[in-house]
Structure formats: C-alpha cells, structure tokens
Amino acid sequence: MIDVQIFSSFSDVLNYLETKRDNLLKALEVKVENNDVLNAVDGSFGELSETYRDEIEDIISDINSMLKKIRTSNDYIGIIILVEENGSPSRIYMIPGDLI
Amino acid sequence: MMQYTMLLPFIAIFTALFIIGVTRLPLAFTGLVMAAIAIILGVASFIYRPAMPYLGLLIGVPVGYGFSFLMDKLGINNPLKLQSKQVPENNGKRRITRRKRRDHKSIYVSETTGHVTDARIFENFDEFLQSISMTPALNTVLEYIRKISIIKNELAQQQVLVYEVGKNQHEFIQLVDADSIDEVNDVIQRAIRDRVMVSNKINSILSNKETIKEIIGGRFMVIYIDGAPDKIIPLYYNQE
C-alpha cells in the first residue's frame, strides 16, 4: 500500500515522522487480548493478526533510519513528497517549487 | 580398572554420534550442557573411581564436532541433525518472514494483502472522528488529485531529487532524467488509487459512527491496515 504525504519543509517531515513514531511506540506498550478487538467499520468483534507487533516494529525502525538521514540535510525548502510503503517511510522526492 | 579403560574408546564413539545430533541446537545451549557434563564427571570420578572412564565423554566432544563438520563439508545429509533442527525454528521464523516481506517491498509491485501501517491511541471517539475526517483522508480525494496534478505539471519541467531508505547513499541525489519523473508520476498514481480504498472504508465507519461510539466508550487504540482504520481495541487502565 502506497501513501504519499506532502510537506513544504523538512522540519514538518521531522515532526510528522517523530509523532508517528511516538504513537507507534505507545501502541506497542498496549497488551491486546484477542477478545477486545473490534472491527472499525461496524463495531463487530474482530481478530488482530499475530504479526501486528512485528509490523509496527518494522515501521519504527524504518522511521528511525529515515530520521537519521533527514537530520543531516534539512535545510531544503520546496515541495517534499514523503512516500510510505505499507506505513514505512521509504523515500522522499524533493521538487523545487511551491504548491500555493 | 583395566576393563574401564577399554570401554573408553566406545564411550567416545557414542558421544561423537550424540554430538552430531546436538550440533544443530543453539551453540550456547550445547556449551552449557557440555560444561554440566564435564563438571559432573569430574566431581564423580573423584568420589567414585570407577566413573573415571566416562571422562571419555569429554574426548568425544571435539571428535563429534569435527565429524559433524566433515559431514557438512562433504554434503552428507545428517539424519540426526534434522530432528534437533526444529528447536530454534520458531524463534527464527519471525525474522525470516520479516526479511521476506522487506525483500518484496517495492513500489512497482502492487500488494493487495493487508499490512499494519499505523497505530494510534485516542482519548475519545470525537478525537478519532476528527482525525479521519481531517485532511487529506476525507477532504475529498478530488482535492488531493488536484494538488497532485499541479505537482505533475511542475514535474514536467523540473528536476527531481530522490532519496531512499535502505541504500547506502547519504547524500541527496540529483536526478534529471525522464525515468525519475516517470517514477514520481507512478508513485503518485498508485497513492491516489490506494487513497480511494481508504476513503471508502472511512465512509462506512462514518455511517456507523453512532453504533461504534456506543460500543467503544472512552480510551481506545486504533490499528490501521493499509492506511485505513481497521481494528479498534478499547483500553482499560490495567492494559498499559
């Protein structure tokens, strides 16, 4: 699943990624019992895949490695497209210009 | 005393065979067992002299390792190894699937199976409703496409810089070729397609919001699958 986030500066990207990471870390602290899970669409009882913690950990480590790289060069101003593959930041496209 | 010393080589051979089976166990575990055997035998041989020949077990250890190593080198299938191999498998499985998933990750391959993409904790239902009604999820997909098309037009003339995780490049790379512009186009087109599915799901959540709100109550965690809220886990005080 591909998602795209658009930013106008790297500090916004940093904020976005750090907030997302913090949320994920908090989510990892929660112990989920399977009888607590509801489907978001209609509120019926659901099941959570066993690998969800692994997937969250994967995303966190991808965010961390992206954050490390961004911090070294965050003075760019322009259109910044952050591409997320299955929730993990995978690449950044920087396009000179302005959306507004 | 004599008959015990004659037994020694046989014991060594048996130990060697035993070790062949054990080699596939985690090394630390094997080492621990060996250390325990050595200590027990050492102590026993002092207390009870006839136990001394069993120290031959210790000779068997390096012989067994060597034998097993040779079998591996020669490509001979070791029947004893296969049985004990199952022990660390469960532990390793997670890593293997994880790596597999990473290897298959590519923006050129369309994936239809669900992946956890995010997880957030909300204090109340209204906060959650606000987050899914907010940009750009519900702020109509059209608005999003409009913005994207502006970028696409920009792209037609401008250069694109690409920066990617998982590669060893620590600098932003300047790409001016048509390929990179096509790539951005492709990625954005795919994101638009995926967003439509997300907003469909959010629409059905919104149409059921009264029912869901009643069931959930206060604090809860939302697991997002493929970008859309998929599972809700009500939180109680003892869960954190």
Image (spheres, rainbow, N blue to C red):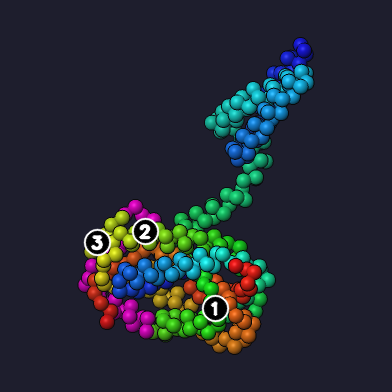
Q: Residue at x 65, y 45 (%)?
A: B87
Q: Earlier in the sequence, mark 1 or mark 3?
A: 1
Q: Secondary structure at mark 1?
A: loop
Under mark 3, the amino acid is Gln
Q: Is residue B119 left or right of residue A42?
A: left
The magenta stretch is B143-169
Q: Where in the figure is residue B14, as x and y percent of width and height?
A: 70, 26
Residue B78: assigned label:
none
Does the rendering let one see residue A34?
Answer: yes
- Give the residue pinned by disc 2: A68
Task: Say above or below: A79 vs B42.
Answer: below
Under mark 1, the amino acid is Glu
For marks 3 and 2, give the CA distance.
Answer: 20 Å
Q: Is residue B90 left or right of residue B150?
A: right
- Residue A88's quadrant in the figure? bottom left
- Give the residue pinned by disc 3: B174
Tell me whether circle 1 and circle 3 mark residues in contact (CB < 8 Å).
no
Task: Say above or below: B97 vs B66.
Answer: below
- Give the residue pinned by disc 1: B123
Under mark 2, the amino acid is Lys
Residues A5 and B78: in front is A5
